[in-house]
Amino acid sequence: MSEYPMQRASGCPLSPPPPLRALAAEKPLHRLEIWDGSAPWVVTGHAEQRALLSDPRVSVNEHLPGFPHFSSSMADTLDQRPKMVFNLDGDEHSRFRRIMTRAFTVKRITALRPRIQQITDELIDALLAGEKPADLVQQLALPLPSLMISELLGVPYHDHDFFQRTSRVGISRNADPEEHEKANRALTEYLVGLVRAKADDPGEDVCSDLAERVGAGEITELEAALIGVQLLVAGHETSANMIALGTAVLLDDPDQLAVVRAVADDPKLIAGATEELLRHLSIPHVGQRRIATADIDIAGETIREGEGIIIDLPLGNWDPAVFPEPERIHLGRDATRHQTFGFGPHNCVGQQLARAELQTVYGTLFRRIPTLTLAVPFDELDLKHDALAFGVHELPVTW
Ligand code: HEM
């Protein structure tokens, strides 16, 4: 039996692993062996992914026996993880989710766009004033989403080193369990302090909203802090990876870069190009984990109650039935049905914020620095094969 996850091929690191693509071409779901010897269903078809991600018989409850954990460290730290949107189903999930989505209304994100533009411009000014070559991850890709999520939450930016470091350990798939727990505890304590401070001195930010809900008796102080931690953790590392990897891919492909430059002033076209990059790069690449709570018939197979399910988003985004010639980046195609932000009740809460950041960077960077190039060949970039979100560790650029 084949094993999951599989390695990407060294010559084409942006493609899902070729053996998995070959299996996906045969049928939309297969049983594959994972690290603990179990054989959950790995779902690769776009339609089947959507059906299962929105099926109430499919659960994210990682405490159920048979749940296909990412790694032994994730299984070992099971009891240390609090209840949160990622691991709750049904009404319990909706209760937290409602509080989160209130913070990310389209209106609030639209109002943030000028600020995203301003920060992007300031970071590019600082980049241009500094030495070459420079690391675009440290100079732009990481600080932009970190600044935005910290402003949205009301986290003072001078604490950004602390929360970048701790959240990186907090989401690492292979972190030592002790380190993992220490990082999450430190972030939680930090957020408890912040929610308390906002209760006394509220502002126009999400932590102040959370403090208000604590005051109204809707959630506890700890729950408020955990919501803040989840947004902080989910809100900067993923976007940073997508900014950096998308930039690297464009700099490596003069034809696509010319397309992006040509549409940079047209918000609709730059939004379309961003969706295609999100589809093609599919940075959440380790499979979304689920478990069946009843027998489910799908695509001629029966997933039995208690069997694990892994939704491989990159393969859904490369399903040729939905996206012809999926291996081609075609910035003009309608890629809006991609699943890089998930689908169903757990779809990404922060997707409008992420889109606003990505569109701003792709629409600004190459216009502001027309001579921007990679300072090392693309195939020498250090790719994040081991992280929850695919990306580059560093992006050396020059101009
Ligand atoms: C390019 C950037 C991003 C990508 C690719 C991404 C991807 C995803 C995916 C695939 C899921 C669904 C997980 C599942 O169903 O198992 C998800 C959920 C989530 N994302 Fe994002 N995300 C991004 C940015 C953000 C940002 C900026 C925030 C917050 C500020 C955020 C907050 C969340 C939260 C809270 C959830 C959990 C929702 C739930 O379980 O109900 N994400 N994200």
Image: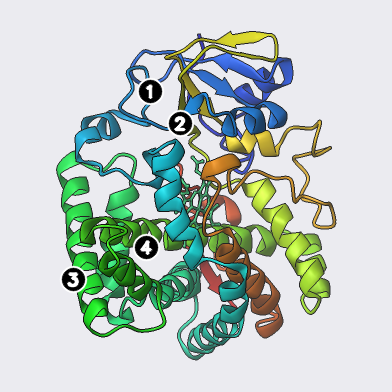
Residue 8, given in percent of the width and then of the height, sits at 55, 34
Write down the residue under mark 3: 193
Which amino acid lies under the numbered mark 1 shown in the image of this protein?
Phe
CB at disc 2 and ligand 1 closer than 8 Å: yes
Q: Nearer the viewer, residue 251 or 196?
A: 196
Q: Alpha-carbon distance for marks 2 and 3?
A: 32 Å
Q: Residue at x 68, y 20 (%)?
A: 28
Circles 1 and 2: CB distance less than 8 Å?
yes
Q: Is residue 125 left or right of residue 65?
A: right
Q: Nearer the viewer, residue 109 or 334?
A: 109
Q: Alpha-carbon distance for marks 4 and 3?
A: 15 Å
Write down the residue under mark 4: 232
Element carrying mark 2? strand
Write down the residue under mark 2: 289
- The quadrant where residue 75 appears: top left
The numbered dot on residue 67 is: 1
Q: Earlier in the sequence, mark 4 or mark 3?
A: 3
Query: Badge 2 local density, few (<14 within 10 Å), some, or many (20+)?
Result: many
Residue 25, given in percent of the width and then of the height, sits at 73, 20
